[in-house]
């Protein structure tokens, strides 16, 4: 068993170091690079927390959609080929839901602050409430 | 050689290179790197004479190598296109000097440094300018599309819509990073393929970020390396790619305006009718194209061509274009997804 603190907690501490201590001392290109680095580390943190679960969900949906086993990469390529050949379209049962869920899951890790993502999330919430 | 000696060496070369274009030049001051990509870099400096200080920009290929790009025009052609655009009344910087081998500064050119702002979020903050800026963009596009390119010494690539999309498909296939959403978008583009049209000069990267803005509106359209001959509606769609709205997603034109206002100003300035459906086709095509470019940057990071954190991080931005494409092509689907 690995000891505490976890990699995720150490990562959070590095982000705080970059943002709260180092960035205020930097300017111009260096400040920009430090911000890019802090953002990238936050992405890594979210990937550590949910990356595996997200890929497992995507894999499960692909197996159901294509009706056969295979690795995530294999099945994702098979879906791409099927869409390209028009054997699968948006009208195929489960496809729209799969693509939306996979994309939103990815965005939650990669860019949760992106305006379109936040808009879609808030539309989903108001849809649930009504 | 240390950085200071290197910079003083570069200053000397700039003074020599500009001796013809800036009579009486005695020195170059405040040489500063503005940005540096993997293949191209931009420097700001002042040319000093006995009576004046002239603010200038150097745009050149990195190191002394020629720009080695798969697409896009080389820097001397870009300078030619800028001069053509200037002569045709398009707001662009004046080209002061095109670098020659004897200048020993690499491949590139020196141009006027126009005063103003290019930072998208700062441009979005000053809303008082936005109505004027949309009109200026429509007028600038109309001017660009009206230019006669026959005098250019290098012939620009000409592509009808079907060929342009085939090129995007080629780039996507070359990456070997399949995306089901992109496949869906390619199907949509095939189903909605545009007919051939009379081709014109197209800027090719007309977006918030390449617009230099002052208190009086659009002062210069920058970054012409994507200039080519194509459907004029390419520019009219490109400026609305959601990634270039910088958070202001309801203001379709660059985050600062409405499509209808852009189209109106374009039609007024050009005297030609434009087709909103064609602009919409290109908006979708170029939304995906930006996603493919993110994939190319991921590739540059993975292969070590550009190992910077920035490059690698942009590689993870492909998904934002997948989300924007889904929203355009399957707008009702989000309700069922979790």
Image (cartoon, helix red, strand yellow):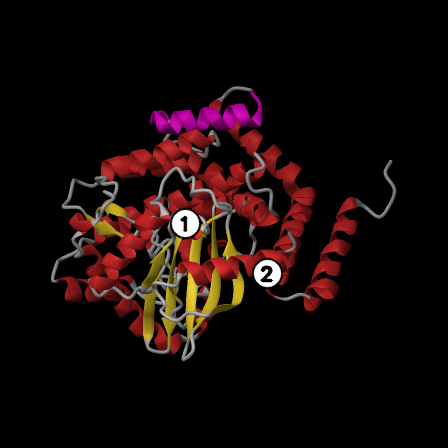
Against A129, residue A80 (above or below) is above
Looking at the rendering, the stretch of residues picked out in magenta corresponds to A70-87
* Residue B212 picture location, percent across and down: 38, 67
Which residue in the protein does label 2 denote?
A29
Element type at mark 2: helix
Q: How many marks?
A: 2
Percent x, y of residue A66: 47, 24
Q: Residue at x 38, y 70 (%)?
A: B114
Say which chain tag 1 marks: B
Q: Is residue B241 magenta?
A: no
Number of the label disc, if any, that sits on residue B102: 1
Q: Is residue A74 magenta?
A: yes
Q: Secondary structure at mark 1?
A: helix
- Label 1 – label 2 distance at C-alpha: 32 Å
**As rendered, which of B175 and B28 lies closer to the eye?**
B28
In this view of the protein, which residue sits in the foreground, A24 or A102? Answer: A24
């Amino acid at each position: 068993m690995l000891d505490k603190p976890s990699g995720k907690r150490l990562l959070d501490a590095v982000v705080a170091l970059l943002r709260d201590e180092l960035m205020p001392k930097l300017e111009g290109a260096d400040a920009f690079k430090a911000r890019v680095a802090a953002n990238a580390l936050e992405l890594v943190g979210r990937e550590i927390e949910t990356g595996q679960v997200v890929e497992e969900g995507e894999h499960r949906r692909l197996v159901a959609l294509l009706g056969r086993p295979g690795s995530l990469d294999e099945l994702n390529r098979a879906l791409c080929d099927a869409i390209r050949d028009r054997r699968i379209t948006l009208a195929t049962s489960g496809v729209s839901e799969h693509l939306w869920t996979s994309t939103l899951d990815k965005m939650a890790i990669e860019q949760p602050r992106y305006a379109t993502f936040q808009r879609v999330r808030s539309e989903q919430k108001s849809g649930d409430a009504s | 050689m240390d950085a200071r000696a290197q910079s003083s060496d570069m200053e000397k070369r700039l003074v020599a290179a500009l001796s013809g274009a800036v009579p009486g030049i005695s020195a170059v001051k405040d040489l500063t790197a503005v940005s540096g990509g993997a293949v191209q870099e931009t420097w700001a400096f002042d040319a000093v004479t006995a009576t004046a200080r002239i603010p200038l920009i150097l745009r050149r290929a990195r190191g002394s190598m020629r720009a080695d790009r798969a697409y896009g025009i080389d820097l001397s052609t870009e300078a030619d296109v800028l001069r053509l655009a200037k002569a045709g009344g398009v707001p662009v910087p004046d080209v002061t000097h095109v670098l020659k081998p004897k200048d020993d500064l690499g491949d590139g050119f020196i141009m006027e440094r126009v005063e103003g702002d290019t930072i998208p979020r700062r441009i979005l903050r000053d809303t008082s300018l936005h109505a004027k800026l949309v009109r200026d963009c429509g007028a600038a596009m109309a001017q660009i599309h009206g230019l006669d390119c026959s005098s250019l010494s290098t012939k620009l690539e000409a592509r009808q819509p079907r060929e342009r999309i085939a090129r995007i498909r080629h780039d996507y296939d070359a990456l070997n990073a399949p995306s089901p959403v992109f496949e869906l978008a390619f199907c949509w583009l095939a189903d909605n393929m545009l007919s051939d049209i009379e081709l014109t000069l197209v800027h090719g990267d007309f977006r918030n970020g390449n617009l230099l803005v002052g208190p009086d509106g659009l002062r210069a359209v920058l970054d012409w390396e994507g200039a080519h001959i194509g459907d004029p509606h390419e520019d009219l769609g490109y400026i609305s790619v959601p990634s270039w709205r910088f958070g202001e997603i309801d203001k379709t034109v660059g985050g600062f305006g409405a499509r209808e206002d852009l189209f109106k100003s374009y039609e007024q300035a050009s005297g030609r009718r434009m087709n909103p459906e064609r602009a919409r086709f290109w908006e979708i095509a170029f939304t995906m194209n930006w996603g493919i470019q993110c994939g190319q940057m991921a590739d540059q990071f993975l292969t070590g061509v550009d190992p910077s954190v920035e490059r690698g991080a942009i590689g993870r931005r492909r998904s934002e274009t997948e989300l924007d494409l889904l929203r355009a092509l399957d707008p009702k689907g989000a309700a069922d997804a979790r």
